[in-house]
Image (spheres, rainbow, N blue to C red):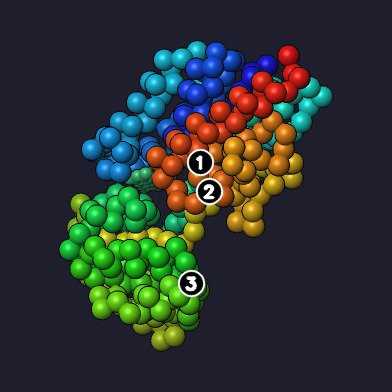
Amino acid sequence: PFDVLVVGGGPAGSAAAIYAARKGIRTGVVAERFGGQVLDTMSIENFISVKETEGPKLAVALEQHVKEYDVDIMNLQRAAKLERGSEFVEITLQSGAVLKSKSVILATGARWREMNVPGEKEYRNKGVAYCPHCDGPLFKGKRVAVIGGGNSGVEAAIDLAGIVAHVTLLEFDSKLRADAVLQNKLRSLPNVTIITEVLSTEVVGDGNKVSGLTYTDRATNESHKIELEGIFVQIGLLPNTDWLKGSEVELSNRGEIMVGAHGNTSMEGVFAAGDVTIVPYKQIIIAMGEGAKASLGAFDYLIRSSAP
Ligand code: FAD
Protein backbone atom coordinates (compact mmCIF):
# COMPACT_ATOMS: atom_id res chain seq x y z
CA PRO A 1 0.00 0.00 0.00
CA PHE A 2 0.92 3.64 -0.46
CA ASP A 3 1.29 6.23 2.26
CA VAL A 4 -0.02 8.92 -0.09
CA LEU A 5 -1.91 8.17 -3.29
CA VAL A 6 -2.61 11.18 -5.48
CA VAL A 7 -5.47 11.01 -8.00
CA GLY A 8 -4.79 13.46 -10.84
CA GLY A 9 -1.62 14.53 -12.63
CA GLY A 10 -2.20 18.23 -13.23
CA PRO A 11 -0.46 21.08 -11.37
CA ALA A 12 -2.21 20.23 -8.07
CA GLY A 13 -1.46 16.50 -8.25
CA SER A 14 2.14 17.07 -9.32
CA ALA A 15 2.80 19.45 -6.44
CA ALA A 16 1.13 17.07 -3.99
CA ALA A 17 3.24 14.14 -5.23
CA ILE A 18 6.52 16.06 -4.97
CA TYR A 19 5.77 17.32 -1.46
CA ALA A 20 4.85 13.79 -0.33
CA ALA A 21 7.84 12.11 -1.95
CA ARG A 22 10.19 14.63 -0.34
CA LYS A 23 9.04 13.29 3.04
CA GLY A 24 10.41 9.90 2.06
CA ILE A 25 7.01 8.19 2.15
CA ARG A 26 5.53 5.78 -0.41
CA THR A 27 3.85 7.97 -3.00
CA GLY A 28 1.81 7.13 -6.08
CA VAL A 29 0.01 9.18 -8.74
CA VAL A 30 -2.89 7.87 -10.83
CA ALA A 31 -3.73 10.13 -13.75
CA GLU A 32 -6.04 9.77 -16.67
CA ARG A 33 -3.88 12.25 -18.58
CA PHE A 34 -0.72 13.47 -16.88
CA GLY A 35 -0.45 17.24 -17.31
CA GLY A 36 -4.17 17.93 -17.04
CA GLN A 37 -5.65 21.14 -18.42
CA VAL A 38 -2.18 22.54 -18.90
CA LEU A 39 -1.88 20.28 -21.95
CA ASP A 40 -4.70 22.25 -23.60
CA THR A 41 -3.19 25.64 -22.90
CA MET A 42 -1.01 27.61 -25.25
CA SER A 43 0.66 30.66 -23.84
CA ILE A 44 1.01 30.90 -20.05
CA GLU A 45 2.15 34.30 -18.79
CA ASN A 46 0.97 34.30 -15.19
CA PHE A 47 2.96 31.45 -13.68
CA ILE A 48 5.00 33.66 -11.44
CA SER A 49 8.79 33.69 -12.02
CA VAL A 50 8.34 32.11 -15.46
CA LYS A 51 7.79 35.08 -17.75
CA GLU A 52 6.27 33.02 -20.51
CA THR A 53 5.82 29.36 -21.28
CA GLU A 54 3.55 27.05 -23.22
CA GLY A 55 1.17 24.46 -21.80
CA PRO A 56 2.76 21.35 -23.30
CA LYS A 57 6.19 22.58 -22.15
CA LEU A 58 4.97 23.12 -18.59
CA ALA A 59 3.30 19.69 -18.64
CA VAL A 60 6.63 18.05 -19.55
CA ALA A 61 8.38 20.04 -16.82
CA LEU A 62 5.78 18.88 -14.28
CA GLU A 63 6.31 15.25 -15.18
CA GLN A 64 10.10 15.58 -15.17
CA HIS A 65 10.04 17.20 -11.75
CA VAL A 66 7.81 14.45 -10.33
CA LYS A 67 10.10 11.81 -11.87
CA GLU A 68 13.08 13.26 -9.98
CA TYR A 69 11.57 11.49 -7.00
CA ASP A 70 10.62 7.95 -6.20
CA VAL A 71 6.98 8.30 -7.25
CA ASP A 72 4.98 5.49 -8.81
CA ILE A 73 3.25 7.20 -11.77
CA MET A 74 0.27 5.33 -13.19
CA ASN A 75 -0.67 7.35 -16.27
CA LEU A 76 -3.70 6.73 -18.52
CA GLN A 77 -5.60 5.19 -15.62
CA ARG A 78 -8.98 6.43 -14.54
CA ALA A 79 -10.12 6.20 -10.94
CA ALA A 80 -13.72 4.98 -10.76
CA LYS A 81 -14.45 4.50 -7.06
CA LEU A 82 -13.26 5.68 -3.66
CA GLU A 83 -14.11 3.80 -0.48
CA ARG A 84 -12.79 2.91 2.93
CA GLY A 85 -11.47 -0.62 3.17
CA SER A 86 -10.86 -2.41 6.44
CA GLU A 87 -7.42 -0.87 6.86
CA PHE A 88 -6.80 1.54 4.00
CA VAL A 89 -8.54 3.94 1.69
CA GLU A 90 -9.19 2.08 -1.55
CA ILE A 91 -9.31 3.43 -5.08
CA THR A 92 -10.76 1.18 -7.75
CA LEU A 93 -9.55 1.97 -11.25
CA GLN A 94 -11.67 1.60 -14.35
CA SER A 95 -9.43 -1.33 -15.28
CA GLY A 96 -10.67 -3.11 -12.15
CA ALA A 97 -7.37 -2.83 -10.24
CA VAL A 98 -7.65 -1.70 -6.62
CA LEU A 99 -5.02 0.60 -5.09
CA LYS A 100 -4.70 0.94 -1.32
CA SER A 101 -3.28 3.84 0.59
CA LYS A 102 -3.17 5.28 4.09
CA SER A 103 -4.08 8.68 2.68
CA VAL A 104 -5.42 9.96 -0.62
CA ILE A 105 -5.23 13.35 -2.30
CA LEU A 106 -7.97 14.06 -4.85
CA ALA A 107 -6.75 16.41 -7.59
CA THR A 108 -8.91 15.48 -10.55
CA GLY A 109 -9.40 19.05 -11.74
CA ALA A 110 -12.23 20.46 -13.79
CA ARG A 111 -13.24 21.15 -17.37
CA TRP A 112 -14.87 24.17 -18.97
CA ARG A 113 -18.32 23.62 -20.36
CA GLU A 114 -18.22 24.25 -24.09
CA MET A 115 -20.78 25.92 -26.36
CA ASN A 116 -20.62 22.92 -28.70
CA VAL A 117 -20.90 24.97 -31.87
CA PRO A 118 -18.94 24.64 -35.12
CA GLY A 119 -15.58 26.39 -34.99
CA GLU A 120 -15.25 26.34 -31.19
CA LYS A 121 -12.75 23.48 -31.03
CA GLU A 122 -10.93 24.56 -34.18
CA TYR A 123 -10.29 28.06 -32.82
CA ARG A 124 -9.53 27.12 -29.22
CA ASN A 125 -6.43 29.13 -28.23
CA LYS A 126 -6.83 31.00 -31.55
CA GLY A 127 -9.42 33.41 -30.24
CA VAL A 128 -11.69 31.08 -28.30
CA ALA A 129 -10.73 31.30 -24.63
CA TYR A 130 -12.12 30.15 -21.31
CA CYS A 131 -10.07 32.04 -18.74
CA PRO A 132 -10.14 35.86 -18.60
CA HIS A 133 -7.40 35.97 -15.92
CA CYS A 134 -5.17 33.96 -18.24
CA ASP A 135 -5.93 35.25 -21.71
CA GLY A 136 -7.54 38.67 -21.19
CA PRO A 137 -4.32 40.63 -21.83
CA LEU A 138 -3.84 38.85 -25.19
CA PHE A 139 -6.88 40.80 -26.45
CA LYS A 140 -5.75 44.25 -25.39
CA GLY A 141 -7.42 46.85 -27.62
CA LYS A 142 -9.44 44.21 -29.49
CA ARG A 143 -13.14 43.30 -29.65
CA VAL A 144 -14.37 40.30 -27.71
CA ALA A 145 -17.57 38.52 -26.78
CA VAL A 146 -18.34 36.86 -23.46
CA ILE A 147 -20.77 33.97 -23.63
CA GLY A 148 -22.85 33.60 -20.46
CA GLY A 149 -24.64 36.06 -18.21
CA GLY A 150 -24.10 34.33 -14.87
CA ASN A 151 -21.70 35.64 -12.25
CA SER A 152 -18.60 34.33 -14.01
CA GLY A 153 -19.67 35.74 -17.39
CA VAL A 154 -20.51 39.16 -16.02
CA GLU A 155 -17.33 39.27 -13.90
CA ALA A 156 -15.36 38.33 -17.00
CA ALA A 157 -17.05 41.06 -19.04
CA ILE A 158 -16.29 43.71 -16.39
CA ASP A 159 -12.69 42.52 -16.13
CA LEU A 160 -12.21 42.44 -19.92
CA ALA A 161 -13.86 45.83 -20.46
CA GLY A 162 -10.86 47.36 -18.70
CA ILE A 163 -8.43 45.76 -21.14
CA VAL A 164 -10.09 45.32 -24.52
CA ALA A 165 -11.73 47.84 -26.88
CA HIS A 166 -15.23 46.43 -26.71
CA VAL A 167 -17.12 43.60 -25.02
CA THR A 168 -20.38 42.05 -26.20
CA LEU A 169 -22.02 39.87 -23.57
CA LEU A 170 -24.41 37.22 -24.88
CA GLU A 171 -26.93 35.43 -22.70
CA PHE A 172 -29.28 32.62 -23.72
CA ASP A 173 -31.97 33.58 -21.21
CA SER A 174 -34.12 36.72 -21.47
CA LYS A 175 -32.22 38.26 -18.54
CA LEU A 176 -28.80 38.04 -16.91
CA ARG A 177 -28.48 35.73 -13.93
CA ALA A 178 -25.56 37.49 -12.24
CA ASP A 179 -25.87 39.31 -8.90
CA ALA A 180 -27.51 42.73 -9.22
CA VAL A 181 -24.39 44.56 -8.05
CA LEU A 182 -22.38 42.98 -10.89
CA GLN A 183 -25.11 43.72 -13.44
CA ASN A 184 -25.21 47.37 -12.35
CA LYS A 185 -21.46 47.65 -12.66
CA LEU A 186 -21.56 46.05 -16.11
CA ARG A 187 -24.33 48.37 -17.35
CA SER A 188 -22.33 51.41 -16.20
CA LEU A 189 -19.44 50.59 -18.54
CA PRO A 190 -19.32 52.53 -21.82
CA ASN A 191 -17.68 49.83 -23.95
CA VAL A 192 -20.04 46.95 -23.18
CA THR A 193 -23.08 45.76 -25.16
CA ILE A 194 -25.44 43.25 -23.58
CA ILE A 195 -27.55 41.00 -25.78
CA THR A 196 -30.03 38.62 -24.18
CA GLU A 197 -32.20 35.79 -25.49
CA VAL A 198 -29.66 34.63 -28.03
CA LEU A 199 -28.09 31.34 -28.97
CA SER A 200 -24.53 31.36 -30.27
CA THR A 201 -24.37 29.28 -33.41
CA GLU A 202 -20.88 29.40 -34.90
CA VAL A 203 -17.34 30.61 -34.32
CA VAL A 204 -16.14 32.11 -37.58
CA GLY A 205 -12.51 32.53 -38.54
CA ASP A 206 -10.01 32.84 -41.36
CA GLY A 207 -8.43 29.46 -40.73
CA ASN A 208 -5.84 30.91 -38.34
CA LYS A 209 -7.82 33.00 -35.94
CA VAL A 210 -11.30 34.04 -34.92
CA SER A 211 -12.93 36.82 -36.91
CA GLY A 212 -16.54 36.65 -35.74
CA LEU A 213 -19.40 34.95 -34.01
CA THR A 214 -22.86 34.20 -35.33
CA TYR A 215 -25.92 33.91 -33.14
CA THR A 216 -29.67 33.50 -33.44
CA ASP A 217 -32.03 35.95 -31.81
CA ARG A 218 -34.42 33.57 -30.05
CA ALA A 219 -37.32 36.03 -30.11
CA THR A 220 -37.27 36.66 -33.87
CA ASN A 221 -35.29 33.61 -35.04
CA GLU A 222 -33.09 35.95 -37.06
CA SER A 223 -29.42 35.22 -37.47
CA HIS A 224 -26.76 37.88 -36.79
CA LYS A 225 -22.98 38.13 -36.97
CA ILE A 226 -20.61 40.10 -34.73
CA GLU A 227 -17.11 40.88 -35.95
CA LEU A 228 -14.58 40.36 -33.22
CA GLU A 229 -11.20 38.88 -32.36
CA GLY A 230 -11.94 36.93 -29.20
CA ILE A 231 -14.68 34.85 -27.54
CA PHE A 232 -14.62 34.02 -23.83
CA VAL A 233 -16.90 31.10 -23.02
CA GLN A 234 -18.19 31.40 -19.45
CA ILE A 235 -21.00 28.91 -19.17
CA GLY A 236 -19.63 26.80 -16.35
CA LEU A 237 -16.64 24.96 -15.00
CA LEU A 238 -17.45 21.34 -14.25
CA PRO A 239 -15.45 19.62 -11.50
CA ASN A 240 -14.36 16.05 -12.28
CA THR A 241 -16.20 14.51 -9.34
CA ASP A 242 -18.85 12.32 -10.95
CA TRP A 243 -16.92 9.28 -9.77
CA LEU A 244 -17.11 10.51 -6.15
CA LYS A 245 -20.89 10.78 -5.99
CA GLY A 246 -22.10 8.31 -3.41
CA SER A 247 -18.72 8.25 -1.63
CA GLU A 248 -18.08 9.65 1.85
CA VAL A 249 -16.56 12.79 0.34
CA GLU A 250 -18.86 15.76 0.72
CA LEU A 251 -19.43 17.85 -2.41
CA SER A 252 -20.85 21.36 -2.73
CA ASN A 253 -24.06 21.97 -4.66
CA ARG A 254 -21.83 22.63 -7.70
CA GLY A 255 -20.15 19.28 -7.27
CA GLU A 256 -16.88 20.67 -5.95
CA ILE A 257 -15.11 18.89 -3.10
CA MET A 258 -15.59 20.61 0.26
CA VAL A 259 -12.17 21.18 1.86
CA GLY A 260 -10.89 22.65 5.09
CA ALA A 261 -7.85 24.79 5.70
CA HIS A 262 -5.49 21.81 5.45
CA GLY A 263 -7.04 20.44 2.28
CA ASN A 264 -8.92 17.91 4.41
CA THR A 265 -12.24 16.53 3.14
CA SER A 266 -15.15 15.04 5.09
CA MET A 267 -13.60 11.58 4.71
CA GLU A 268 -10.81 10.70 7.12
CA GLY A 269 -7.42 10.43 5.46
CA VAL A 270 -8.72 11.93 2.22
CA PHE A 271 -7.52 15.35 1.11
CA ALA A 272 -8.19 17.38 -2.03
CA ALA A 273 -6.62 20.23 -3.99
CA GLY A 274 -6.89 22.32 -7.13
CA ASP A 275 -9.74 23.05 -9.52
CA VAL A 276 -11.78 20.12 -8.20
CA THR A 277 -12.32 21.81 -4.83
CA ILE A 278 -14.41 24.73 -3.58
CA VAL A 279 -11.28 26.91 -3.43
CA PRO A 280 -11.99 29.86 -5.75
CA TYR A 281 -9.96 31.20 -8.70
CA LYS A 282 -8.93 28.28 -10.84
CA GLN A 283 -5.32 28.94 -11.76
CA ILE A 284 -2.11 26.93 -12.11
CA ILE A 285 -0.27 28.74 -9.34
CA ILE A 286 -3.21 28.34 -6.99
CA ALA A 287 -3.62 24.64 -7.84
CA MET A 288 0.07 24.03 -7.13
CA GLY A 289 -0.09 25.85 -3.80
CA GLU A 290 -3.20 23.92 -2.81
CA GLY A 291 -1.56 20.64 -3.87
CA ALA A 292 1.45 21.35 -1.64
CA LYS A 293 -0.89 22.25 1.21
CA ALA A 294 -3.02 19.11 0.89
CA SER A 295 0.13 17.01 0.77
CA LEU A 296 1.45 18.54 3.99
CA GLY A 297 -2.03 18.04 5.45
CA ALA A 298 -1.87 14.36 4.53
CA PHE A 299 1.62 14.06 6.02
CA ASP A 300 0.43 15.64 9.26
CA TYR A 301 -2.45 13.18 9.31
CA LEU A 302 -0.08 10.24 8.79
CA ILE A 303 2.28 11.17 11.61
CA ARG A 304 -0.67 11.62 13.96
CA SER A 305 -2.54 8.46 12.99
CA SER A 306 -1.83 5.09 14.48
CA ALA A 307 -1.48 3.45 11.07
CA PRO A 308 1.96 1.77 10.93
P1 FAD B 1 -6.20 19.70 -13.95
O1 FAD B 1 -5.15 20.45 -14.63
O2 FAD B 1 -7.57 19.67 -14.52
O3 FAD B 1 -5.68 18.18 -13.80
C1 FAD B 1 -6.55 17.16 -13.40
C2 FAD B 1 -5.85 15.82 -13.51
O4 FAD B 1 -6.71 14.79 -13.02
C3 FAD B 1 -5.50 15.40 -14.94
O5 FAD B 1 -4.29 14.68 -14.92
C4 FAD B 1 -6.67 14.48 -15.30
O6 FAD B 1 -6.36 13.58 -16.34
C5 FAD B 1 -6.85 13.77 -13.99
N1 FAD B 1 -8.14 13.11 -13.77
C6 FAD B 1 -9.40 13.63 -13.88
N2 FAD B 1 -10.32 12.71 -13.54
C7 FAD B 1 -9.63 11.59 -13.20
C8 FAD B 1 -10.00 10.27 -12.74
N3 FAD B 1 -11.28 9.92 -12.53
N4 FAD B 1 -9.01 9.38 -12.50
C9 FAD B 1 -7.70 9.72 -12.68
N5 FAD B 1 -7.29 10.92 -13.10
C10 FAD B 1 -8.25 11.84 -13.35
N6 FAD B 1 -4.23 28.79 -15.53
C11 FAD B 1 -3.24 29.71 -15.36
O7 FAD B 1 -2.80 29.92 -14.23
N7 FAD B 1 -2.72 30.38 -16.42
C12 FAD B 1 -3.14 30.18 -17.71
O8 FAD B 1 -2.65 30.84 -18.64
C13 FAD B 1 -4.17 29.23 -17.93
N8 FAD B 1 -4.67 29.02 -19.15
C14 FAD B 1 -5.62 28.07 -19.35
C15 FAD B 1 -6.06 27.80 -20.64
C16 FAD B 1 -6.98 26.80 -20.88
C17 FAD B 1 -7.41 26.54 -22.30
C18 FAD B 1 -7.50 26.04 -19.79
C19 FAD B 1 -8.48 24.93 -20.03
C20 FAD B 1 -7.09 26.32 -18.49
C21 FAD B 1 -6.15 27.33 -18.25
N9 FAD B 1 -5.70 27.64 -16.96
C22 FAD B 1 -4.69 28.54 -16.78
C23 FAD B 1 -6.27 26.96 -15.77
C24 FAD B 1 -5.32 25.84 -15.26
O9 FAD B 1 -4.97 25.01 -16.35
C25 FAD B 1 -5.98 25.07 -14.15
O10 FAD B 1 -6.35 25.93 -13.09
C26 FAD B 1 -5.05 23.98 -13.58
O11 FAD B 1 -4.60 23.12 -14.59
C27 FAD B 1 -5.75 23.19 -12.48
O12 FAD B 1 -4.90 22.19 -12.04
P2 FAD B 1 -5.45 20.87 -11.35
O13 FAD B 1 -4.26 20.02 -11.10
O14 FAD B 1 -6.33 21.22 -10.23
O15 FAD B 1 -6.42 20.17 -12.42
Please name the amino acid that badge 2 sits on: Val
Nearer the observer, 10 or 179: 179
Q: Is residue 294 above or below residue 180?
A: above
Q: In terms of secondary structure, where does tag 2 sit?
A: loop
Is the residue indicated by label 1 positioned so its CB lies within 8 Å of ligand 1? yes
Q: Nearer the viewer, mark 1 or mark 2?
A: 2
Q: Amino acid at mark 3?
A: Ala
Q: Residue furthest bottom?
A: 220
* Cα–Cα span, label 3 and label 1: 25 Å
- Taking the image as shown, residue 290 lies to the left or right of residue 157, namely right
The mark nearer the N terminus, 3 or 1, is 3
N-term mark: 2 or 3 = 3
- Mark 1 sits on what residue? 274
Local secondary structure at mark 1: helix
Q: Kindly check if marks 1 and 2 are in contact, taking CB atoms under 8 A apart as contact.
A: yes
CB-based contact (under 8 Å), mark 3 and mark 1: no
Residue 201 in sight here: no
Give, as a three-letter code, the residue at label 1: Gly
Q: What's the residue at 56%, 46% (across, down)?
A: 277
Which quadrant of the view contains residue 94? top right
Asked if disc 3 is less than 8 Å from ligand 1, the answer is: no
Secondary structure at numbered mark 3: loop
User: Residue sitting at 30 percent across and 31 percent down?
Assistant: 57
Question: In the figure, 47 relative to 254: above or below?
Answer: above
Write down the quadrant of residue 244 in the picture. top right
Residue position marked by numbered label 2 in the rendering = 279
- Mark 2–mark 3 Cα distance, whole angstroms, equals 20 Å
| Residue ID at (35%, 67%) | 157
Q: Mark 3 sits on what residue?
A: 178
